[in-house]
Image (tube, helix red, strand yellow):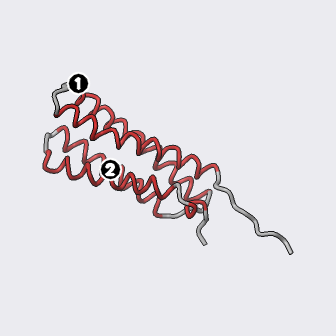
Amino acid sequence: MTPPVVRRPRVTLWLLRAVVTVHVVAVLSQPIWAGMFLTGDIDAITVHGTIGSVLAAWDMLVIGAAIAYAIAARGRLWVPLGAVALFLLIGFQIGFGYARELQFHVPLGVAIVTLSLLSGFLVWTPAAARGRS
């Protein structure tokens, strides 16, 4: 009897995990910088805005890694769709922030943090290493 083949995560999954983890760390820093600005550190808003812009660019890497994961590793198809959705939400978030539309910027920020944490959690689960059937 042949032992079952144990599939290890492919390079594309490890790449996806790396870029999503960096994304999550950057997203989690955003409320800290906003809070520092609100407590009087005027320069913190510049860092907050810069990280937001970098996140939009970084999310293009996330989208690329998600597509590679979905195609090459036969990973879950929702991953690239979720990456595109987060990219679009961050684009709206940047627009609302620069327009000072805080009634949209703050709740959307909470949604982005929540979705980013969820995606960060999901790419590290064992289910992410299993291919589509």
Relative to residue 33, is residue 129 drawn left or right?
A: right
Residue found farthest to the front: 39
Q: In this rendering, is residue 126 above or below 52?
A: below
Q: Nearer the viewer, residue 58 or 9?
A: 9
Q: In this rendering, is residue 81 above or below 28?
A: below
Q: Amino acid at mark 1?
A: Asp
Q: Residue at x 30, y 39 (%)?
A: 30
Q: Estimate the spatial distance between the alpha carbons at disc 1 and disc 2, rounded to whole Å.
A: 22 Å
Q: In this rendering, is residue 17 above or below 4?
A: above
Q: Residue at x 37, y 35 (%)?
A: 54
Relative to residue 126, is residue 62 drawn left or right?
A: left
Q: Amino acid at mark 2?
A: Val
Q: Can you identify the residue that label 1 sits on? A: 43
x, y percent for residue 117: 39, 52
For the residues bearing labels 1 and 2, Cβ distance under 8 angstroms: no
Q: Which mark is residue 113?
A: 2
Q: Residue at x 29, y 46 (%)?
A: 91
Q: In this rendering, is residue 5 above or below 47?
A: below
Q: Nearer the viewer, residue 39 or 25?
A: 39
x, y percent for residue 24: 41, 45
Q: Could you tell me which quadrant the N terminus lies in? A: bottom right
Counting other residues with Cα less than 10 Å from the Cα at mark 1, is it few (<14), some (14-19), or many (20 or more)?
A: few
User: Residue 44: which quarter of the image?
Assistant: top left
Q: Secondary structure at mark 2?
A: helix
